[in-house]
Amino acid sequence: MKGTHLGEFQEIVMLSILILDENAYGVTIQEEIDSRMKRKTSRGALQTALTRLEEKGFITSSYGEPTAERGGRRKRYYQVSNKGVVVLKEAKDLRQDMWKLIPKLA
Amino acid sequence: MKHPEIPSFIYRLFQWFCKDSLFEELEGDLEEKFLLNKEKYGLKKARRIYTQEVLKMIRPTILKRKTSGPSYQAALFASYAILALRNLRKHKLFSFINVFSLSIAMSTGLIVIGMISDLLKFDEFQEHKNEVYRVISTQNRGGWTYKQQATSPLPMAKEMLEQIPDIQISQLGRRLVGLSEVGEKKLNVTGIYADENFFDFLSFNLIRGKKSAVLNEPFSVVLSQSFATKVFQDKEPIGETMSINGVGTFKITGIVDDPPKFSHIQFEIIGSLSTVHVLANQGLINPSYNSWENLDSYYNYIHIKENRSKTEVLNWLKNTASSYYANPEEMICSFELQAINEVVPGKDLSDQIGPKMMVLPIIVLSTIAIAILLSAIFNYTNLSMARALKRAREVGVRKLNGATNKAVFLQFTIEAIILSLFSLGLGVVLFIFIRPGFLQVVPRASEVLKLELSTGLVLWFLLFAVVSGLIAGIAPSMYFARLSSLKALRSGGTLKTLAKINFRKGLIIGQFTLSIMFILAIVIANKQYTYSLNYDMGFDKENILNVSLQGNDPELLKTELKKLSEVSEVSFSSYLAGMGNEYSLMLLDPRNQDSVWVNTMSIDHSYISNFKLQLLAGRDFYENENQNQEQSIIVNETFVKNFGLGNPLDAVGSTFDIHGNSVEIVGVVKDFHYDNLEEQIYSFVFRNQASYGYANVKISSTDLLNSIEKIEEVWNEIEPRLDLDAQFFDDQIEDYYQFLVDIMKLFGFIGFLAISISCLGLFGMTIYSTETRLKEIGIRKTFGASEKTLLYLLTKGFLKLVIWGILIGTPICYFVFDQFILAQNFYRMEISFVEIGVSVVFLLSICLLTIVTQTWAAARTNPSEVLRNE
């Protein structure tokens, strides 16, 4: 199981990266999650998720150019890898199948 | 580079613990977020968020890994821990004394931590806790400034809402109390009034009913969940009616969750504030309630939305509000805003809506707890250094084998922390035992405190124990770390164990300074208590039973009661003298047109004779005087003196105006204590007015219990719905001064802890030092020293320290009590040599006992036994 398992928070992080497309780095991902989920996540918690996702190969990352607004520090941009997209789709299909099996849907 | 506005300590902390590979990205993100937050919330909040974010970074994925073998470090720590445990087991006496004294000291510390953590929780459940304020006010009438009040005038809300945008106001009223009746059920109920905005921004959860509708109509009431269950059980309460004695009949419109324990607003029911307007029209409430001049009973809670600053409201209160006072000479008020989560613990205000807890007692208790803890820590420091001789070899060998100063330091520190953690375990057990007693003894504690062991609290306890251990261990650790191995290993005697002797002596003196202060405090509180109880109040309170009228017809009660053979006299008064109540009245002196505030009480014609007040001149009130058209007053001696009316006989016949009505002094009574002993007797006026609160029943029979039963029968005939509320005056006075007994209990307990800790320390010190001097004693004995001289020699040193402690502590305690605590009472006892003497002798004898039991044994040892080895 370990290695391919996708936690709820990790799934949200990946979806956020996909939504943000070219502009997915720490601050924007955090804000995307905060505004959409209406909850406060810490950058630290996000980092744990990102590390795990990268270890599993679901996302990749690369440094951008240094900018003045961050005291000259580079941003690290994240992209979802093909493997990641597949896992996300699987998770979605699995859920949809289960929804369909519910006999009485209110 | 770091942005200059980011807190640099936090930044450096982050840099220190964050993996280098992640630091650039994460710090960049945090900095960008910081700048965004600064725009959005301002610098202060942005810095706070930054700090929180950094603290949340402490997690395995981000923390740096130690490159130099972590296993080696862990092994070292483990070995220190094992060593510490072995040492604790080996030196049982040392461990026992320390664990015992530290744990009792900790139990008080834990109580204080628990208390503070509970108080910090107050009103934290309010969703808008940072945006809701209460208007508090100070009134000044004719140059007389009153105590700051939690209440404020009602009309202010309308004006403010019109003139300041983006605020919400909810108005509350206190004391919706009385006997409630629903069908056949009768229950006493306490609640508040609130207007229709109550649920808009205050976080009380309405379960049934519509937020905007439940408190709209007059005579609507919302019940708390528990009260509703109590009255209706499973029946449907909504739509039912409930009458409250003396107020009216209410319609039940909603149900609200019980207010949380940690809320300063407490209620069983909430009545609509519009009810008050109707009550005023009916004449049940003084029509002035809705004026700028009325500061009693009503509250304004303002919600200032996050994006607006409170200065706007403050300025309005400061500049505009004062313009509503037409005649500032006569009356003017100033207003402040109090944040909702600063109410408890908070300022000492009158007219609070719910439980209150001031900051001062917390500071006092914390100081005491810290003092006791320090005392226990001194024991550890002292005893560790006293047995340095025994452990010096161990340190020497360790150092020869290559231990660094740092390693030795670490070893001894860990030992202290482990001991402290052991003590914490025992301390928590003690804490659980003391808790119920503490909640009972400390006035009002159970109203505001739970002292529940939550995970958060346990974490604080652990931190507390570790810090205590660190402080206790620092001096001995440093001492051992600096010890040179050569000195330590040289044969015994030359080691200067007593090098730090002055330091240690100082610690012991400190402990006994504390002990004598506690003993003195108890003795003095006890004396003041008996003094207050036996003080001649100036009136005869013997065998007087005070019956609360609870709104019943006084004359009817009097006629019925007088039929009883046990009752010799019945009089009436508006309140009870001698128990901290005073009512004020504005009196106009027609000769110079001066208005003066005096204290007053309304009584009937029997009161003065019933309480055996002494008439110095003139007469009592007449029995058939017209009470609606007030004509006469009786004043006290001080009144005559303050108004310069000459002697009492001359004063009779002078006239004064009460609210434009001319009254004549018909009598002068000798001064008596209408207020408590804290207050000086001031100008006082008896009015002959039928606004009574109590009947004072003089009982002639010696069978008091039987008399009360008979009175109760009479009461039940007149008022079958309410229980008789009657108490003997003597008992009431005793109750009133009960707080002194509570203080004694509290100090007694804490003092007992302080003394046991100090004595345990002394005990340990005596043992160690006599042990090291055994050889000396042996030699002295062989040369012919008697047991008596040896005893004197061994005891003298310690006793001297105790005496020093007494010499320092007594004047401090005397000064504190004389200048601050007793000074609050205008009529008070003086601290005499008897109190001081008793305390000193008590402490000295305990100490002597502790020391002599040890030195006596040492003095009697057979010299051949100790010297045999030489």
Image (cartoon, helix red, strand yellow):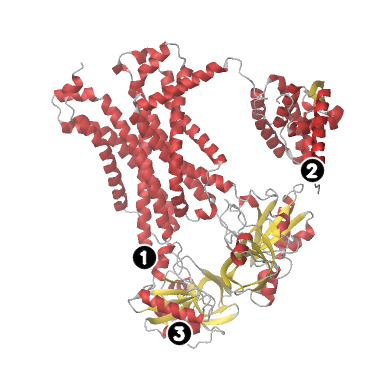
Residue B352: horizontal and vertical position, in percent?
59, 59
Could you tell me which chain the residue with mark 1 belongs to?
B
At 23% from the left and 25% from the top, the residue drawn is: B774
Residue B672: horizontal and vertical position, in percent?
41, 71
Dot 3 alpha-carbon crowd within 10 angstroms: few under 14, some 14 to 19, many 20 or more: some
Could you tell me which chain the residue with mark 2 belongs to?
A
Indicate left or right for B179 with B769 as reference.
right
State the residue position of label 2. A102
| Residue B760 in which image quadrant | top left
How far separated are the C-alphas under marks 3 and 1? 34 Å
Q: Amino acid at mark 1?
A: Tyr
- Frontmost residue, B420 versus B6: B420
- Frontmost residue, B236 versus B96: B236
What SS does tag 3 mark?
A: helix
Indicate left or right for B117 with B255 as reference.
left
Tell us which disc is closer to us: 2 or 3: 2
State the residue position of label 1. B535
State the residue position of label 3. B560
**Residue sticking out furthest to the left:** B784
- Frontmost residue, A18 versus B660: A18
Count up the numbered dots. 3
How far separated are the C-alphas under marks 1 and 2? 83 Å
**Residue sticking out furthest to the right:** A22
What SS does tag 1 mark?
A: loop
Q: Quadrant of the C terminus of chain B?
A: top left
Dot 2 alpha-carbon crowd within 10 angstroms: few under 14, some 14 to 19, many 20 or more: few
